[in-house]
Image (cartoon, rainbow, N blue to C red):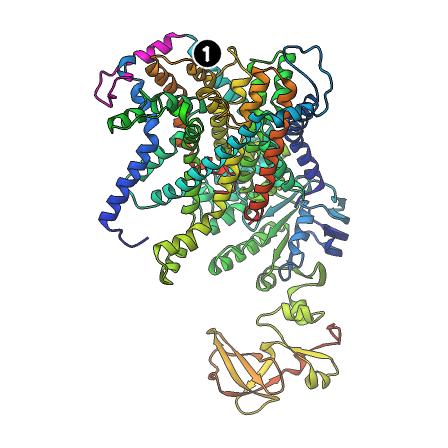
Amino acid sequence: MATQNTTKVARAMMAPSVIALLIWMIVPLAMTLYYSTLGYSLYNPISTPFVGLDNYTYFLTDPTFIAALTNTLVLVVGVLIITVGGGILIALLLDQDVYGVNVVRLLVIAPFFVMPTVAALVWKNMMMNPVYGVIGQAMSGLGLAPIDWMTDVPLTSIIIIVAWQWLPFATLILLTSLQSLSADQKEAAEMDGAGALSIFWYITLPHMSRAITVVVLIQTIFLLSIFAEILVTTNGGPGSQSTNITYLVYQQAISFGDIGAASAGGIVAVILANIVAIFLIKAIGKNLDA
Amino acid sequence: MGKIQLQSVTKAFGGVKVIPDLDLDIENGEFVVFVGPSGCGKSTLLRLIAGLEDTTSGTISIDGKDATHLPPAQRRLAMVFQSYALYPHMSVRKNIAFPLKMAGRNKQEIDKRVDNAAKILNLADYIDRRPGQLSGGQRQRVAIGRAIVREPAAFLFDEPLSNLDAALRVGMRLEISELHQRLKTTMIYVTHDQVEAMTMADKIVVLRAGNIEQVGSPLELYTKPRNTFVAGFIGSPKMNLMGGSDAKSHNADMIGVRPEHIDLSQSEGQWKGEVKVSEHLGSDTFLHVQTSDHSEPLTVRAGGEFPVHAGDTVYMTPQQDKIHRFDGKGLALR
Amino acid sequence: MARQVTKQRKIGMTVLAWAVGLLIFFPILWTFLTSFKTELTAISIPPQFMFFDWTTENYSTINSQANYFHFMANSIYLALGSTLLGLLFAIPAAWAMAFSPTPRTKDILLWMLSTKMLPAVGVYIPIYLLFINLGLLDSRFGLIVVLFLINLPIMVWMLYTYFKEIPVDILEAARMDGASLRQEITQVLTPMAVPGIASTVLLNVILAWNEAFWTLNLTTTDAAPLTAFIASYSSPQGNFYAKLSAASMLAIAPILVVGWFSQKQLVRGLTFGAVK
């Protein structure tokens, strides 16, 4: 509903954002693609011969890559299970008639605002340190042998830290969705003879399905590129036990100075992210339009 | 001044022609009502005149000057929207002053004109409130106030009363009519309610699917509908339309008789039927009567205290000089 | 619900909810408490919960390290700078999409969302090299531009969903009233959009403040914000828990407060308007 004049103006107003994002997306991506075909080391930047797909062969056959790919998937899926599952339960709890529910909500969402480096260091040192950490001390107090989290179960540790950061996000969104469910519907189901469990299964959960898909989609986008938490806790180690794709590319570029291989890794990451994105957008497509 | 002419105006959204080809003259000072069922293109027509939509082809001229490609602000028209479209963050005073401020008028003049409009519309008591704190009727008045301060060439109203309750609607209808008497400015008013059209208009434009079915004074449309569509749309309750032998005896394919032009009797008449429903309005009683001659029940107006009930048998005779005759295409035979 | 919930049930739920809330909040609470301990108390076995000699010496130590404020200032610069730049681009774009939509508007919005799915490492190498060549490495300006770009899709989406709620009638009324496009935006649209813009600003400040890929990889000292400052504490073990805690509290406290105030708007911003 507009006149031609306003349409023209509208186009001009959209242009800066569209152009900025287009450049931001295409130029570096094209350059990454270009670098990925070069033998390009930061330590010898004068000679950058064309090497075809060698970098890809090198990157993809590197056993670390398979490990990093597995770690990336385990990290994403693990965090999703904890946050969505936990988020639903906590949302249901906070939807109840509870004294001081507003304060509890503030407590629950707080971790989301903690910057990743702080979250990772607080957990690494004050929670998970086997000697001085609260968890270690609690376990010792119970007569159990403390776990050296960062050495023995590095990936699990990172999953816990990241899940702690994202649980509030899932909870907040699922709670918002839950509270938009009209009481009428629940009452109608109750009149129809549904019990609490049936109401949850047939009314509440379907109502939340859209919010759940949104949570899964958005978290996946962010979780695929977890970086700071790994950098300040395990440095990807021990070995490559907690290296994900993002961290591997960073290592190739910064630690080894291998721009060619790192670029190939970057392209692989883009392809992986796109597979997930296409899959997810398809899965939620009808949900988002509704 | 406010003489508006539309010549061969068409409007298409994508491939859909909303207004195929339309000519219309609106004289200075006239109160013109566009009426028709929803989707007939009446609001689109108003928005074309306002300049909120581009015409696909044709010209719109205001006071003899081509305005087809002028932006809305330069057409010297003021519009009252169905939703009132008041600026929620501004007080009543600032809402009314807004068009004057945009025109760059000085402060004294703005104050004078706003106060004057507030007086005309009884807005003085809540001039400093925000729209959110006003009732529907009050918001309506503010929207009208915002329109009149501009002293426009013409006012455009887009179903302005449809969000008000029935009692307020009647009151506002009167106020708008009085405003027209006082200002004598051209007004174009869009509605789907034929009662509003009949009571307010100098000239009614009946639209269907973007085509003008008939233009005329309310009385012309009532007494001489050009076709069955206008005949059925104007007048309440609707005209009774019937074909068959009734029509043949009048040399027509279809005839129409308004409920108020049928005489009732409890003993004799042309048609005999059984009362299905009787609606008592106090001043009038409308009977819905099923006869054996007609497939649809006939609607008949009786006096306020005509003593019949559902199930009673009545006799009806149409007033011969009030019968409307139509041909096979639905056009009136004169 | 008009019915009374039984007292026992309500108390039970309350206890459970508070237990869960405190458990989730515990790491932050513990950091808060530790920041007021001496380094020795901080690592005492068994741990001291509340009953220790509270001291603010960690905070004064950090304050006396003049460079702490340097990092703090950088965080503020980056958050505000990228947000302002973002508003400059996003407001007109969202305005156009909301009020003059074309058949392609939805596609453009989805495409913008898709740029957000591009993993940072996919564009990291060229940006890094480009920054070296242009002398932008470790510069506030370069980082502001990057943060602006990564958050632009979210800003456009969020503003779009807010603008969508402003009735078109009102803008048309302004047009009829003789407002120019500029006046339409400054005098009618902007005041009505202020709440939405404010929420967008808050969310963007939070995201920029906590961003930890680009800020860690494109800075060393000059432009390094608090994320990088805290990361420097990850160096070898030592008795620095209390100071780490104090530094952490200073880094997260402002954003925690902002976040608590804007929790409602966050949902909408972070879900691209899909959940309200």
| Crowd band around label 1 with a 10 angstrom C-alpha radius: few (<14), some (14–19), many (20+) | some
Residue C40 appears left or right of A36? left
Report in which chain the residue with disc 1 lies.
C
Relative to C218, is C173 above or below? below
Residue A73 seen in the current view? yes
Residue C245 appears left or right of B69? left
> Measured from the top left, where is residue B22 in percent x and y?
75, 56
> Measured from the top left, where is residue C65 in percent x and y?
39, 8
Residue A114 appears left or right of C12? right
Relative to A133, is B305 above or below? below
Prevailing secondary structure of the magenta residues: loop
Hey, what amino acid is under mark 1? His
> Measured from the top left, where is residue B320 in percent x and y?
66, 83
Of residue B14 and residue A184, the one placed in the foreground of this image is: A184
Q: Is residue C45 magenta?
A: yes
Residue extending farthest bottom? B267
Of residue A176 and residue B258, the one placed in the foreground of this image is: A176
Residue B54 appears left or right of C190? right
Residue to which mark 1 is pinned: C70
Q: Read off the magenta span.
A: C42-65
Residue B102 seen in the current view? no
Of residue A50 and residue C23, the one placed in the foreground of this image is: A50
Q: Count the labels in the image.
A: 1
Q: Is residue B334 magenta?
A: no
Classify mark 1: helix, strand or loop. Answer: helix
Relative to B171, is A26 above or below? above
Residue C109 position by quadrant: top right
> Measured from the top left, where is residue A31 in percent x and y?
68, 23
